[in-house]
Image (tube, rainbow, N blue to C red):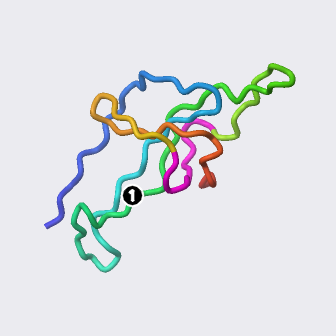
Amino acid sequence: MATATAPRKKTRLNIRPLGDKIIVRRDEAEDRTEAGIYLPEKAKDTPKTGVVLAVGDGALNTETGERVPLEIQKNDRVIFSSYAGTEVTLDGEEYLIMSESDVLAVVD
């Protein structure tokens, strides 16, 4: 019997990333294989994809003192490296704070 996961509530994000940092909500781990076999919690792969919730104001150009805007934008779906970022939990929700350079691709 499949268990339904509760939909994620939309909450106002009370943190703001600095510089070239972004905040990502990681996608949910799959609970069954393509063949329909249910996976125990320990066997689930940690997803390497997610949605960007907030972006910083850009890296500082040390020569000119100006900010270099990020290529990644809020609501982009991204693929990131396996050990990217720092995991934080706020109000019961888990987020990743990572540098723009940790992102490998934006999914269109």
On screen, 97 above or below 60? Answer: below
Residue picked out by circle 1: 46
Q: Residue at x 33, y 62 (%)?
A: 30
On screen, 84 above or below 53? Answer: below
Q: Residue at x 56, y 35 (%)?
A: 22
Residue 104 lies in quadrant: bottom right
What is the secondary structure assignment of the residue under circle 1? Answer: loop
Specify the amino acid type for callout 1: Thr
Residue 43 percent coordinates (x, y): 28, 67
On screen, 83 above or below 66? Answer: below
68 is within the stretch colored magenta: no
Q: Residue at x 31, y 41 (%)?
A: 8
Question: Which residue is more in the foreground, 3 or 97?
Answer: 97
Please rate how many residues cluster around mark 1, counting C-alpha atoms within 10 Å: few if below 14, some from 14 to 19, many from 20: few
Question: Which residue is more in the foreground, 55 or 5?
Answer: 55
Residue 7 percent coordinates (x, y): 28, 44
Q: Quadrant of the C terminus?
A: bottom right
Q: Residue at x 13, y 67 (%)?
A: 1
